[in-house]
């Protein structure tokens, strides 16, 4: 595992989902008062730092960044998805649902199978991630439950080796606008419980909520969704162009990125436009 993605695991916890659910809502599904939420967040942080200071420092250094636009928000979301897959043994892959408007879409999938599961949820209009968005509560469902509620989602998940779903709502204080989605591989635990570092995962969600709030604070939801969709498309184009440059010019990823940015500066165009030209011409 790359060093900047590694988080040590001295404090794996089994089945502490009630703590996670309390993080965003009370038992009646009402919004948690901000001072209570802040207290919980502080408690998660302190416990995580006490048990694994270097691991928490890694999470914080990767996610505690200023989010001024859609591109930076997507970067933070990508970092978060990679981090949770790296630090939670049971997580096969992860992704984030953006639901700023009526047409949700996926950002930062760590595997194409996450995209397939999400696409069926969006087509159906329901599923673990959308339920987390609607209820503002953590959703924790086993495969059998998913197959009962949404047979086609269950079928796709089963074929991908997924045994359990966890979805955490994300958003501003006035509205939930997305979810962090965790797709868990089959567990050897006889109770099919999911073990994960609850406090560190909660800190990751806290950072994502801060990023989402910063991005959407001064934007209408429709505008926020439009800008984020374009930024997602631009990132995909840039990533593909980087792959082309790496293959054709025998460059490492950092070198290829430097070349792409230099060409954008020289031509007076955006990095995304330069990437489109690389894909169209090979140069």
Image (cartoon, helix red, strand yellow):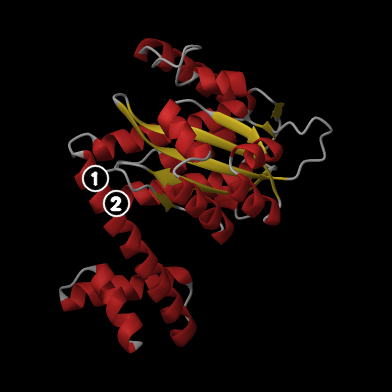
Q: Position of residue 194 (x, y in %)?
A: 70, 33
How many marks on residues?
2
> Which residue is denoted by mark 1 in the rendering?
224
Instruction: Find residue 249 and name its label.
Output: none
- Image vertical order of residue 248 relative to residue 6, above or below: below
In the image, what residue occupies the spot 60% across and 31% down?
140
* Quarter of the image with the N terminus in it: bottom right
In the image, what residue occupies the spot 35% across and 71% down?
258
Residue 235 visible in the displayed image = yes
- The quadrant in which residue 67 appears is top left
* Quarter of the image with the C terminus in it: bottom left
Residue at the outermost left position: 268
Q: Position of residue 18 (x, y in %)?
A: 60, 19
Residue 109 visible in the displayed image = no
- The quadrant in which residue 187 appears is top right
- Image vertical order of residue 241 relative to residue 222, above or below: below
> Which residue is denoted by mark 2 in the rendering?
228
Which residue is more in the foreground, 251 or 109? Answer: 109
Do the residues bearing badges 2 and 1 touch, measured as CB atoms within 8 Å? Answer: yes
- The quadrant in which residue 63 appears is top left
Which residue is more in the foreground, 261 or 129? Answer: 129
Q: Position of residue 236 (x, y in %)?
A: 39, 65
Q: Position of residue 105 (x, y in %)?
A: 39, 51
In the image, what residue occupies the spot 55% across and 61% down?
112
Element type at marker 1? Answer: helix
Spatial CA distance of label 2 from label 1 is 6 Å
Answer left or right for 163 relative to 204: right
| Residue count near mark 1 (Cα–Cα under 10 Å), binned few <14, some 14–19, many ≥20 | some
Which residue is more in the foreground, 116 or 149? Answer: 149
In the image, what residue occupies the spot 45% across and 86% down?
248
Element type at marker 2? Answer: helix
């Amino acid at each position: 595992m790359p060093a900047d993605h590694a988080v040590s695991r001295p404090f794996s916890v089994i089945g502490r989902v009630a703590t996670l659910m309390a993080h965003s809502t009370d038992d009646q599904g009402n919004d948690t008062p901000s001072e209570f939420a802040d207290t919980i967040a502080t408690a998660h942080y302190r416990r995580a730092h006490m048990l694994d200071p270097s691991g928490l420092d890694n999470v914080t250094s990767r996610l505690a960044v200023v989010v001024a636009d859609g591109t930076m928000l997507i970067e933070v979301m990508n970092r978060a998805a990679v981090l949770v897959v790296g630090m939670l043994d049971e997580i096969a892959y992860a992704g984030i649902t953006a639901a700023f408007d009526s047409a949700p879409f996926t950002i930062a999938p760590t595997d194409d199978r996450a995209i397939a599961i999400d696409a069926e949820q969006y087509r159906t209009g329901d599923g673990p991630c959308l339920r987390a968005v609607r209820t503002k509560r953590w959703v924790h469902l086993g495969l059998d439950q998913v197959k009962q509620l949404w047979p086609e989602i269950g079928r796709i998940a089963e074929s991908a080796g997924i045994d359990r779903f966890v979805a955490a709502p994300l958003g501003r204080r006035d509205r939930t606008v997305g979810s962090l989605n965790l797709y868990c591989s089959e567990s050897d635990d006889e109770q099919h419980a999911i073990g994960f570092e609850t406090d560190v995962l909660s800190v990751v969600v806290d950072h994502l909520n801060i990023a989402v709030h910063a991005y959407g604070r001064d934007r209408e939801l429709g505008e926020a969704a439009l800008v984020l969709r374009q930024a997602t498309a631009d990132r995909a184009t840039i990533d593909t162009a980087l792959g082309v440059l790496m293959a054709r010019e025998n460059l490492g990823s950092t070198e290829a990125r430097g070349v792409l940015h230099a060409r954008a500066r020289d031509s007076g165009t955006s990095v995304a436009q330069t990437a489109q030209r690389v894909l169209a011409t090979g140069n």
